[in-house]
C-alpha cells in the first residue's frame, strides 16, 4: 500500500512539474522580519544601528526570503528604543535622514520587500511639543487645544504635571509616555496625517503598538480605534497592511479582529509558555496542527480577510534560544512549526542565528551578530544591557555551514514560498498517527499539505494513502532529500515536506 501510494506520489510530482507555469522570479514568501533599528547594522561607525546600515544589509535580508521588514520606531525620541516619539514626521538623526529612509524603501522595493513602520499612537513622548504646549498652558492657567489632546485630571491621576499644581496626566506606560486622548478630533487628524505622510514615503503598512491600551479596559473602543486607523490607511492605499500588537488572550484577539485589521500577533502561541515553544521542546508537533487548525477556523469566522501572525518572540520577549534551552534541534523544530503555518509569520532579527538575551529589555535587543569573530562588524549593545551575546557563531560563521540555523531558516522560508495557499487558506489538521508529526492541509483553491516531524530522534513513516494524499505532488522538503521522501514517505527527525493536491 505504501509503495503504491509513493509511486502515485512520484508520478504526480512528474506531472506537476510538466504542468508548472514558468516562474517569474521568487514568489513572495509572506514572511516578515522585525528589525530593532538601533541594534541591527551601523553604517557610520558610531556603534548604533541606522537606516543606511539596514540598506547595506538588504542582500542579507533578501537572502532570508522575507518579503517585508518591520522597523521599530525610527522617529526622534530621547530613549534608545524610540517608543516615546517626539516628532512623528521625522527620522531620528542618529538613524539618518528622511532621504535615507526613501533610499531604503526604494532599495527594498527593488527586491520585492515591503517596509512597515511602528505606529506608536497610544501615547507620545513626554518631550513631544503637543504635550509641552498642553502643560505650559495648564501651568499658565491658559486655554490651549493641546490640553484636549491628552487626558488631564485635577486632584489625582497617574503623574503630576510639572509646574501645574494639582494637575495630573494619564500615562499607563510611565511618566515619559503620556497617553493621547484618542477621542480628540485634533489627535485623530494628526494620526491620519502621519499615516498619509509615511504612505507618501512608500511604506507598505504599519505595526500598531499597544492596541489594548488605546482605551484601557474597553476592548470594544480599542477595536473601534483600530478600525479608524485601518480605514484611514486603506483610503489612501487599499493594499496597506496593518498588523497590531494585542498582547492578550485568544478571545480578546478574536474580538480585536472585528476591527477589520489584517493581522494581530499570535501572542497565545508565542513566548515560553506558548504552543510553539512547548511543542518544539517536547518534540510533539501534532498538538500544533490541532490547535492552530481550530484557531484558523475561529479567525476566519471572526474576520474572513484575517491573516494570522505567528511568531516566537519579539523585542519585548526573551530570545527563543533561552526558552529552547540553547538546544539547536529545538530551535530548528520551532522554526519548522511556525514558518509553515497559515498567515504571515514574523521572524525577530537574530532569531535565525539563535541569538541569546533575556531579563531586562535591553538584553532582548542585543546587536545583530554579523560576526562572532570580528566585534567591529556588530553594533554596540544598548547602554543598560547586562548580558553579553552567548551565541558563538554569527552570520559570517553560519553562512557557509549547510547545517546552520541560518541556512535552516532560509530553506524553510524558501519552501513556504512554494505554497501561496499558506497565506490565507483554510487549515485542517491531519492525524498522521504519531504525536511528533504536525500534519495539516491549507486549502485556498488548491490545497497545500504540510508534514513536519518535530521529533529530535524518531523517524516517522507516513501512510500517505491513509492521509488521503495519494495524488499529492511533492513541492519540496527540508531536512530530508526529496528523492528519499519520494522513495519511502518517511520523515527523519527534524524534517518536513510540503505537498500539493489539486
Ligand atoms: Ca550609526
Image (tube, rainbow, N blue to C red):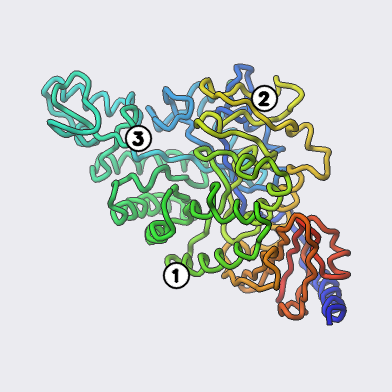
Image quarter of the N terminus:
bottom right
Q: Position of residue 353 (x, y in %)?
A: 70, 39
Image quarter of the C terminus:
bottom right
Which label number is shown at residue 301? 1
Extreme residue toward the left, this view: 141
Viewer-closest of 455 and 204: 455
Q: How far is mark 1 from mark 3, CA to CA?
A: 33 Å
Instruction: Classify mark 1: helix, strand or loop.
Output: helix
Q: Quadrant of ligand 1?
A: top right
Instruction: Classify mark 3: helix, strand or loop.
Output: loop
What residue did someone put label 2 on? 378
Residue mark closest to the camera, 2 vs 3: 3
State the residue at coordinates (75%, 22%): 374
State the residue at coordinates (50%, 32%): 361
Q: How far is mark 2 from mark 3, CA to CA?
A: 31 Å
Q: Position of residue 486 (x, y in %)?
A: 85, 69
Q: How far is mark 1 from mark 2, CA to CA?
A: 45 Å
State the residue at coordinates (68%, 63%): 419
Mark 1 and mark 3 in contact? Answer it, CB < 8 Å.
no
Q: Is residue 142 above or below residue 187?
A: above
Marker count (numbered): 3
| Marks 1 and 2, the one that precedes in the sequence | 1
Q: How many other residues sit within 10 Å of disc 3, few (<14), some (14-19) or many (≥20)?
A: some
Viewer-closest of 109 and 412: 412
Q: How many other residues sit within 10 Å of disc 1, few (<14), some (14-19) or many (≥20)?
A: few
| Marks 2 and 3, the one that precedes in the sequence | 3
What residue did someone put label 3 on? 173
* Left or right of residue 86: residue 276: right
* Left or right of residue 468: residue 271: left
Amino acid at each position: 500500500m505504501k509503495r503504491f501510494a509513493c509511486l502515485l506520489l512520484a508520478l504526480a510530482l512528474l506531472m506537476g512539474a510538466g504542468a508548472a507555469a514558468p516562474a517569474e522570479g521568487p514568489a513572495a514568501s509572506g514572511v516578515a522580519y522585525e528589525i530593532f533599528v538601533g541594534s541591527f547594522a551601523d553604517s557610520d561607525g558610531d556603534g548604533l544601528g541606522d537606516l543606511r546600515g539596514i540598506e547595506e544589509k538588504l542582500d542579507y535580508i533578501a537572502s532570508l526570503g522575507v518579503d517585508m521588514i518591520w522597523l521599530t520606531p525610527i522617529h526622534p525620541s530621547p530613549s534608545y528604543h524610540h517608543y516615546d516619539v517626539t516628532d512623528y514626521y521625522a527620522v531620528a538623526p542618529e538613524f539618518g535622514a528622511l532621504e535615507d529612509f526613501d533610499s531604503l524603501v526604494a532599495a527594498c522595493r527593488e527586491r520585492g520587500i515591503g517596509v512597515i513602520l511602528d505606529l506608536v499612537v497610544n501615547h507620545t513622548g513626554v518631550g513631544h511639543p503637543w504635550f509641552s504646549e498642553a502643560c505650559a498652558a495648564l501651568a499658565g492657567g491658559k486655554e490651549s487645544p493641546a490640553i484636549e489632546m491628552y487626558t488631564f485630571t485635577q486632584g489625582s491621576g497617574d503623574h503630576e504635571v510639572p509646574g501645574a499644581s494639582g494637575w495630573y496626566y494619564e500615562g499607563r506606560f510611565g511618566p515619559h509616555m503620556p497617553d493621547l486622548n484618542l477621542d480628540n478630533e485634533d489627535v485623530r487628524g494628526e494620526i491620519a496625517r502621519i499615516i498619509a505622510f509615511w504612505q507618501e514615503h512608500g511604506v507598505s503598512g504599519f505595526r500598531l503598538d499597544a492596541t489594548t491600551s488605546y482605551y484601557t479596559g474597553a476592548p470594544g473602543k480599542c477595536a473601534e480605534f483600530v478600525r479608524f486607523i485601518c480605514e484611514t490607511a486603506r483610503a489612501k492605499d487599499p493594499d496597506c497592511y496593518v498588523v497590531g500588537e494585542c498582547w492578550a488572550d485568544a478571545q480578546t484577539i478574536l474580538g480585536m479582529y472585528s476591527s477589520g485589521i489584517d493581522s494581530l500577533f499570535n501572542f497565545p502561541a508565542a513566548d515560553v509558555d506558548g504552543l510553539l515553544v512547548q511543542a518544539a521542546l517536547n518534540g510533539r508537533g501534532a498538538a500544533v496542527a490541532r490547535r492552530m487548525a481550530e484557531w484558523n477556523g475561529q479567525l476566519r469566522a471572526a474576520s474572513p480577510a484575517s491573516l494570522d501572525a505567528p511568531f516566537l518572540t519579539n523585542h519585548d520577549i526573551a530570545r527563543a534560544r533561552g526558552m529552547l534551552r540553547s538546544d539547536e534541534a529545538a530551535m530548528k523544530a520551532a522554526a519548522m512549526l511556525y514558518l509553515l503555518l497559515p498567515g504571515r509569520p514574523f521572524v525577530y532579527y537574530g532569531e535565525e542565528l539563535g541569538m541569546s538575551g533575556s531579563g531586562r529589555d535591553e538584553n532582548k535587543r542585543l546587536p545583530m551578530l554579523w560576526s562572532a569573530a570580528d566585534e567591529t562588524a556588530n553594533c554596540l549593545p544598548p547602554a543598560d544591557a547586562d548580558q553579553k551575546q552567548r551565541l558563538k557563531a554569527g552570520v559570517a560563521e553560519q553562512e557557509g555551514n549547510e547545517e546552520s540555523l541560518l541556512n535552516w531558516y532560509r530553506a524553510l522560508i524558501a519552501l513556504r514560498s512554494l505554497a501561496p495557499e499558506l497565506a490565507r487558506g483554510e487549515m485542517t489538521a491531519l492525524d498522521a498517527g504519531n504525536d511528533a508529526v504536525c500534519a495539516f492541509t491549507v486549502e485556498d483553491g488548491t490545497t497545500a499539505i504540510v508534514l513536519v516531524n518535530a521529533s529530535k530522534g524518531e523517524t516517522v513513516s507516513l501512510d500517505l494513502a491513509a492521509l488521503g494524499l495519494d495524488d499529492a505532488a511533492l513541492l519540496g522538503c527540508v531536512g530530508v532529500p526529496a528523492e528519499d521522501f519520494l522513495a519511502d514517505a518517511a520523515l527523519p527527525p527534524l524534517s518536513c515536506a510540503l505537498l500539493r493536491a489539486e
